[in-house]
Amino acid sequence: MEVANGLFGLFAIIPILIYLGLVVFSIYFIVKVIKFMNAKTRLDEQRNEKLDELIRVMGNDK
């Protein structure tokens, strides 16, 4: 009877562990996406500044 109670307890905790794993993965994914978007925004701003400078230089040559 003790073995059956132990197995039942093990099966009862598995859904909790799966849920906890999904929550941890979701938080990790959200943090990675936010870091990626911040880096992308910074790189886009740098590219736009370089394009503006190139347009100014090209416009001054004419």
Image (cartoon, helix red, strand yellow):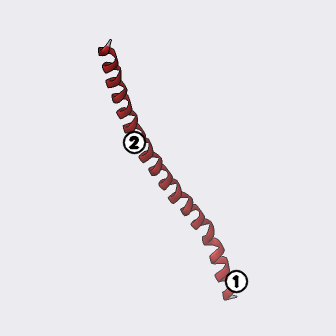
Q: Position of residue 47 (x, y in %)?
A: 38, 32
Q: Please, is residue 30 above or below residue 2 in the view? A: above
Closer to the chain start, of discs 1 and 2, is 1
In this rendering, would 43 be left or right of 14? Answer: left
Most extreme residue toward the front is 61
User: Is 48 in front, or is 18?
Assistant: 48
Q: Residues within 10 Å of mark 2 (few under 14, many from 20)?
A: few
Q: Name the image quarter holding residue 39.
A: top left
Q: Position of residue 60 (x, y in %)?
A: 29, 15
In this rendering, would 37 be left or right of 13? Answer: left
Amino acid carrying mark 1 in the image: Ala
Q: Position of residue 49 (x, y in %)?
A: 33, 29
The Cα atoms of the two marked residues, 1 and 2, are separated by 52 Å
Q: Nearer the viewer, mark 1 or mark 2?
A: 2
Q: Secondary structure beneath disc 1?
A: helix
Q: Please, is residue 32 above or below residue 61 in the view? A: below
Amino acid carrying mark 2 in the image: Asn
* Residue 48 numbered tag: none
- Quadrant (top left/top right/bottom left/bottom right) for the N terminus: bottom right
Q: Name the image quarter holding residue 6.
A: bottom right
Q: Residues within 10 Å of mark 1 (few under 14, many from 20)?
A: few
Q: Residue at x 41, y 47 (%)?
A: 35
Q: Residue at x 33, y 15 (%)?
A: 59
Q: Name the image quarter holding residue 36.
A: top left
User: Is 4 in front, or is 31?
Assistant: 31
Q: Which residue is mark 2?
A: 38
* Residue 4 numbered tag: 1
Q: Residue at x 48, y 54 (%)?
A: 27
Q: Please, is residue 2 above or below residue 55 in the view? A: below
Q: Position of residue 13 (x, y in %)?
A: 60, 71
Q: Are marks 1 and 2 in contact (CB under 8 Å)?
A: no
- Quadrant (top left/top right/bottom left/bottom right) for the C terminus: top left
